[in-house]
Structure formats: C-alpha cells, structure tokens
Amino acid sequence: MGLLSNRVERSEIRPGDHIYTWRAVYAYAHHGIYVGGSKVVHFTRKKEVESSNSSNSFSSLISFSEASSECPTFPDCGFQLSDSGVVLTCLDCFLGNGSLYCFEYGVPSAIFLAKLRGGTCTIAQSDPSEVVVRRAMHLLQNGFGNYDIFEKNCEDFALYCKTGLIPADEPGIGASGQASAAVGIPLAALMSSPFKMFAAGPLGMATVTAGMYCAGRYITDLGVRKDVTKVEVENLSSHLGFRRIEDAESVNSSPDKVKKTLLPMKRKRER
C-alpha cells in the first residue's frame, strides 16, 4: 500500500482486480478490470464518437486513445462492439509504457484521507471476484452507455464492476474519485476563501484549502455517499442514464452488418 498509489507487479494481480496506470506524467489514470489471461476490460468512448470528437482535447486525453492498431501478442486484442465504449485488450496494450497499479477497496477513513491523490482507493467494499469478472464481461457484450468525463468514465466503469453501485441521481458527478478530485481542487480553493481571515499567511491558507479538498473527496467517495444504489448488471441497461441508445436508421441502412463474436485470445508468440 503506497502513500499516493498502490504499485504492484504483474504476478500479484488476480482476476477481478481493479487496475490502473498513470498517463501524461501522472496527469490522469486509466482504469480497467483485469479478467485473467493477460486480458483487461475497460471503458472509453464509442468508436464512431472518437473520431468526431477529436477536437475536444480534454475528452481525448481522459479516454483510452492509446490503443494500438495491431497487438503483437494477441490477435483479438482491441475487441469492441461498434456501438459500445467497452473494450477488451491485453495487459500490455492497456498499460502502454506505464506501470501497473491496483485500486484499493475497503480502506479505513484515515488511510483514504491520507492519500492526497483521488482515484486510487475507496472506502466501499468490493464484491467477490467472480461477480466482478461476470459484470465486466457482460458489459463488454452489452455496453455501458455513453462515455462522459465527469459522470461515466473509465474509473466509474471499474467501480461499478467491483461494487455494483452507481449514483441514483443524474446528471452530476459520478463515482469516480479522479473526477471528484479534479472538480474539488478549484472548489476547495473557492470555498476556503471566506476563511482567509483565519489563515495566518500563505501556509495557513494552504492548510485550509487542503482540508476543504480532503473533506470534499471524502463526502463524494462511493463508500460514503447516500445517493448510490445497487443495480444488477442484467438490469443496468434500463437504469436511468445507462440505456443503450440504438440508431434504428443506422441499423436499417446496414442490413448486412454482422455482429462480431467474442473469441478467446490466443498468443501469437511465447515470451
């Protein structure tokens, strides 16, 4: 258990683990669920949306845009339904050039507050690993709705797979600690401004701002929030905000469209 994040070796992860890797010099992290066999299920924007939204640099940064054109290890790496943002890749492609970290569940409040970086742990408890893998594989074939940086991103996807919990009220901030932290930093500075008179100099002001930031992270954590509900993965498509919107005209215009079947990955070469 690291102070800021929990770096692990590949031999330490197990199916059902929530893993992540830092990108852009620790500017943000990309999250996914390890399902075994060197495979990871994670969430990004839909294929057709990715190219049309390329002008949105912030969205492009947060989403998994580093997918390689062809994986040298697994021929089926990058499996993704055309109308879904959930993708299956090998662990190598998921990590890119980054290191491997494991998201921590059921951490005590003191440990949660001590970790100053959001998106690394939660007070919420994880469900059994077999349930986590089943949710991830179900969503790979059925989708997780539309990608949104603050309401439904890769960390939200992994948190749902691990806990089955999603915010009941939308729109708003999702379960992602990373998104909450991004919003919390400027909000903490704004909210702490009325306390300037009590802060003796820059150090006191920084202390007050840090305290407001930590408090904001805590009350928005999935294990503390009261506006979350448990939804079975089979019922997720009918839940508000997670309905898969199908374009009937697009489907009708492509009658010869064949649904791609998920095949088990096979290694091209031995390491």
Image (cartoon, rainbow, N blue to C red):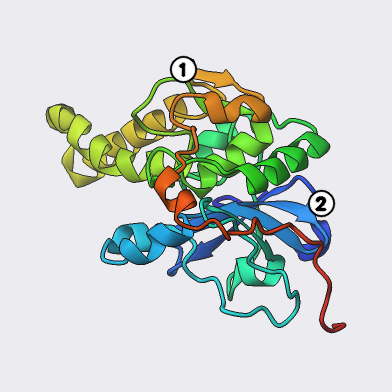
Q: Amino acid at mark 1?
A: Asp
The percent coordinates of residue 43 (x first, y second) are 55, 51
Q: What residue do we see at 52% from left, 39% from top?
A: 114
Q: Which residue is mark 2?
A: 14
> Relative to the observer, which residue lies in front, 85 or 149?
85
Callout 1 secondary element:
loop
> Relative to the observer, which residue lies in front, 55 or 200?
55
Q: Amino acid at mark 2?
A: Arg
Q: What residue do we see at 34% from left, 30% from top?
A: 172
The percent coordinates of residue 205 (x first, y second) are 22, 39
Question: In the shown orientation, is residue 54 left or right of residue 127?
Answer: left
Question: In the shown orientation, is residue 268 left or right of residue 77?
Answer: right
Asked if residue 165 is positioned above or below residue 102 in the image, the reply reads above
Callout 2 secondary element:
loop
Snapshot quadrant of residue 162: top right
Q: Which residue is mark 1?
A: 227
Question: In the shown orientation, is residue 213 left or right of residue 26?
Answer: left
- How crowded pointer 1 is (Cα within 10 Å; few <14, some 14-19, many 20+) is rated as few
Q: What residue do we see at 47% from left, 48% from top?
A: 117
Q: Quadrant of the C terminus?
A: bottom right
